[in-house]
Image (spheres, rainbow, N blue to C red):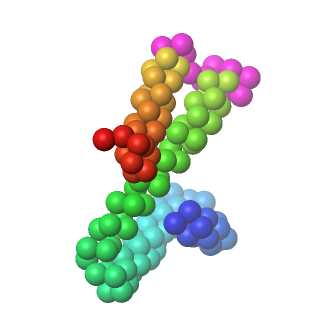
Amino acid sequence: MPHNLYLHSSIVQTRAVKRDPASIRSAIGMSRIDTIASLVIAALIGVQMLGNAAVGQLLVASQVVLSLQLPFALYLLIRMTSDRSLMGEFANTLPTRLLVWTLFVAISAANLWLVAQTVGLAG
């Protein structure tokens, strides 16, 4: 899916759009329709080829993979938004940093537990 989003983003960025509010709204609406249509078509093809049960399993598997990559993205996001030289006055405050690092540890622990259950190390 990320390659699809990258391709879609590069196609959308090459479109010539006037910079007035009505044209921007129209371009956003067309982009939304384009994205929804491509996802619905992909889902219908998946259901047709694999059946309802397999599509459900694939959706769950995709969410598991996404949850496993989340700590990596969060780590970088927290580091960048907490860097005062990068963010200036908008950098995370101490209470925010404590909260987000706590959430990071909780999400990472939950993912480690998921992996342990999946490979049979935890009951």
| Location of the C terminus (image quadrant) | top left
- Please tell me which residue is depicted at 32% across the width and 66% down the height of the picture: 57
Q: Main secondary structure of the magenta part?
A: helix
Give the image location of residue 6, x and y in percent: 61, 65
Q: Is residue 49 above or below residue 103?
A: below
- Please tell me which residue is depicted at 51% across the width and 57% down the height of the picture: 21
Which is nearer the eye, 63 or 37?
A: 63
**Left-right relation of 7 to 113:** right
Query: Residue lying furthest right in this view?
Result: 85
Q: Is residue 105 above or below residue 28?
A: above
- Please tell me which residue is depicted at 51% across the width and 24% down the height of the picture: 101
Q: Is residue 111 above or below residue 18?
A: above
Which is nearer the eye, 43 or 110?
A: 110
Is residue 26 visible in the rendered structure shown here? no
**Left-right relation of 59 to 95:** left
Q: What residue range appears in magenta?
A: 84-95
Quarter occupied by residue 72:
top right
